[in-house]
Amino acid sequence: MNMLKVVPDLNKIARPNWIEINLDALCENVAFIRSQIPVGTKILLPVKADAYGHGSLACSFAAKECGVDFLGVAHINEGILLRQYGIDLPILVLGPCTPADFAYFVEFQLTATISDLKTAIAFDSFLEETETSCKVHLKIDTGMNRYGLKAEDFESIREILKLKHIKVEGMFTHLATADMPNNPGTQNQINRYTRLVHVLESENLRPEICHCSSSAGTLQHPETHFDMVRPGLVLYGYNPMGAFPSPWNIHPIMKIKATVRHIHEINPGEAVSYGGYWVARQPTKVATIAMGYGDGFLRGEYNKGFVKIRGQLCPILGRVCMDATMVDVSHIPNIQVGEVVDIVNGESDFKISMESVAEEHHTIPYEITVRVARRLYRKYIWKNRMLRWDDLQKELKIPAFKEYPYR
């Protein structure tokens, strides 16, 4: 029996769904933030959690081209991976440093976060014994109560700043309620941090880079800009205050797309999807699209939300499945299998913006973006061209993986 043997070329196989990452928009958002902060104030782009789901390598290399000064990650392994792929920007590991990490901070030239006196002393001793050096930033707890040295613990902070071997380059805090307008907790935190900065200045102990502001703080509280800002969500193009459209000149860099996989008609009284939460009241044309919670499309709500086909909003019917979602396409004439569906596209319609999808699911845009599944194919826009990953690597000169880049 003859068997057809085909060697799969993944660049030629039709994709049922994908995301588009607009790195040009990332650069435009960086330029916008530059216009909002004092000349000389640095920008740190958080690329933790795979750059909030947008792709840490692509965003990190594009950010370097766009003039970003620092990158931020949550865990040391995220920073190590960026170094192994050739990123040479300063990288601040925002999560607390532990003794098990000391050698890796030195090996990969990462900037550590120090959250307590005991760890600071241990790290200083390690650096003395190994005759090495490492930059660190002090994390100050002004009211978030997650981790960090208490802002009023002047004695411990002074002791760390006077250690001989760790290089305290920076000091930062994090605002817990900056995205909640007129919340008194924000000003209380700002006041605590500012007081600490002034005390250290008067004693000639102030670190070079003081920073306080994430996205909401950067946009809403200019008094928190200090020496560096850490806008994450806004640089990815979404409003940290949640509302859409945004009052600021920012552009979403992610679009989520899918295709129609099946079309059928149902009669009045027939139900759609798990649990039968949507029941037809009239003859209805249903399209099954290739997007589900296995792709990061949230399942929590049912009979809520829209997608867009041919520029028209199509209501979601019933529950989102793992690999599929059903939508009402009765109003779209002669719809065909294979047609492109806008799942999330804030440039097309506010009802399918990242902010609106988040609001429908009682969450924040951060959670939507970080849940985007790795199985979704990535396409990138750079210098007004749509590129595959291998082409983008060449454009951004992303080098090959190197296990120990500084040896």
Image: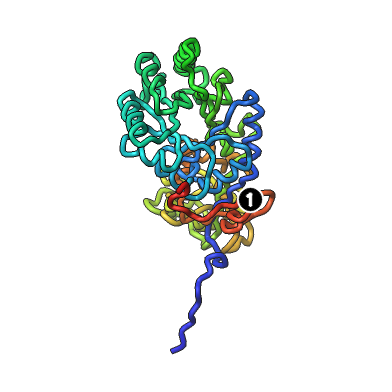
Q: What element carries label 1?
A: strand
Is there any visible trace of residue 140 in the rendered image?
Answer: yes
Tag count in the figure? Answer: 1
How has the structure been colored for display? rainbow
| Image location (x, y in percent) of residue 173 | 45, 24
Q: Can residue 184 be seen in this view?
A: no
Q: Quadrant of the N terminus?
A: bottom left
Query: Looking at the picture, which amino acid does disc 1 mark?
Result: Ile
- Return the residue nearer the eye: 313 or 78: 78
Q: In which quarter of the image is residue 215?
A: top right
Residue 29: image x %, image y %? Answer: 63, 36
Q: In this view, does 84 lie above or below 92?
A: below
Residue at the far right in the pictured view:
384
Q: How crowded is mark 1: few (under 14 residues within 10 Å), some or many (20 or more)?
A: some
Q: In this view, does 224 lie above or below 96?
A: above
Residue furthest to the bottom in view is: 1
**What residue is rendered at 45% in x and 14% in y?**
196
Residue 40 vs residue 25, the one in the foreground: 40
- The foreground one among 8 and 318 is 8
Q: In which quarter of the image is residue 332?
A: bottom right
Query: Which percent across, then down, holds residue 387?
Result: 62, 56
Look at the picture and state if 350 lies above or below 86. above
In this rendering, the answer to whether 53 lies above or below 402 is above
- Residue pictured at 60% horizontal, 54% vertical: 392
Instruction: Estimate the x, y position of residue 103 in percent, counting from the top left.
Output: 36, 40
The residue that disc 1 covers is 381
